[in-house]
Amino acid sequence: MNIYFAASIRGGRDDQKIYADIIQLLGTFGTVLTEHFGNTGITSVSGTGKDVGAIYNQDMAWVTQADVIVAEVTQPSLGVGYEIGRAEDMGKPILCLYRENPERSLSAMISGNKALIVKTYETLADVQILLQEFFKNQTRT
Amino acid sequence: MNIYFAASIRGGRDDQKIYADIIQLLGTFGTVLTEHFGNTGITSVSGTGKDVGAIYNQDMAWVTQADVIVAEVTQPSLGVGYEIGRAEDMGKPILCLYRENPERSLSAMISGNKALIVKTYETLADVQILLQEFFKNQTRT
């Protein structure tokens, strides 16, 4: 089971610790292709430090290779939105994980999109339950 | 010429005035399907106030109907990223307009993506020149 975990990089790294925790949970369900998205060394200015063309090509290759997409969508992010759009057109199963935020609502292109599974969570224990439910319904490859 | 102007709604409305100015410029090149995205009444909490499923369906219908996409990508936004991804898969010409920001770089999924035309600007006069150049290369319908 290859898992593409989508998370905000240049959109902002406020949730880096949560990404790292979710990646650790995801590792019990399969191979997380984007394990480094939880690293503290990645910033919203430098990103992963690689050439943007190389990043684009690598990330899209991983999206293509992935059996499922799990996206953390609390922090607005162009890259996460883009990857969800492309992965949806590839017919990939997509789980979006969201923490309620009084300052802004989740994008209607995510919350109003019936092709996605969108779930809200508060704690990591909630995420664990949501992941179990999601992966139970996926075909292992 | 039907133009889909993509801009941050629930990602944050800091650039609302700039969106309104760009929409006004776009109106000289064709019909802006999302003219209301520049309105002051739209907030990051309520969005346009409509049901999210109805918004999703309407916005995707407009993306499908559009001859071109012009996206303001300075403010990170899941919806804008999603629309760019879907529009790219539909083969639409896509112009991304970006103002440099010292706090964060543009997503590599945008800046590293050769399928998009990505241009930086500072002033509305810059935008006007970029739009003239972009629309000069589009087939009028």
Image (cartoon, coloured by chain):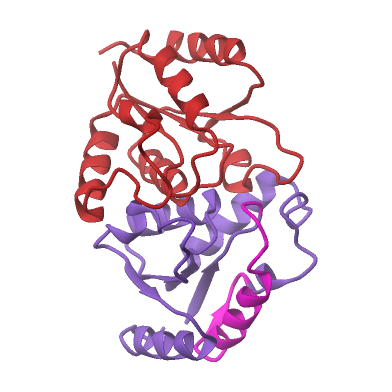
Chain colours: A purple, B red
| Rendering coords of residue A131 (x, y %) | 43, 85
Residue at 55 percent of width and 46 percent of height: B76
Q: Nearer the viewer, residue A96 or B138?
A: A96
Image quarter of the C terminus of chain A: bottom left
Q: Nearer the viewer, residue B53 or B43?
A: B43
Is residue A30 shown in magenta? yes
The quarter of the displayed image where residue B23 is located: top left
| Rendering coords of residue A27 (x, y %) | 58, 86
The quarter of the displayed image where residue A118 is located: bottom left
Residue at 61 percent of width and 69 percent of height: A34
| Rendering coords of residue B5 (x, y %) | 39, 29
> In the image, is residue B15 above or below residue B132?
below
Residue at 64 percent of width and 22 percent of height: B121
Residue at 46 percent of width and 53 percent of height: A81
Q: Nearer the viewer, residue B91 or A41?
A: A41
Is residue A12 shown in magenta? yes
| Rendering coords of residue B141 (x, y %) | 25, 13
> In the image, is residue A67 above or below residue A89?
below
Please indicate whether residue B66 sits to the left or right of residue B79 in the image. Answer: left
Total numbered circles: 0
- The boundaries of the magenta stretch are A10-34
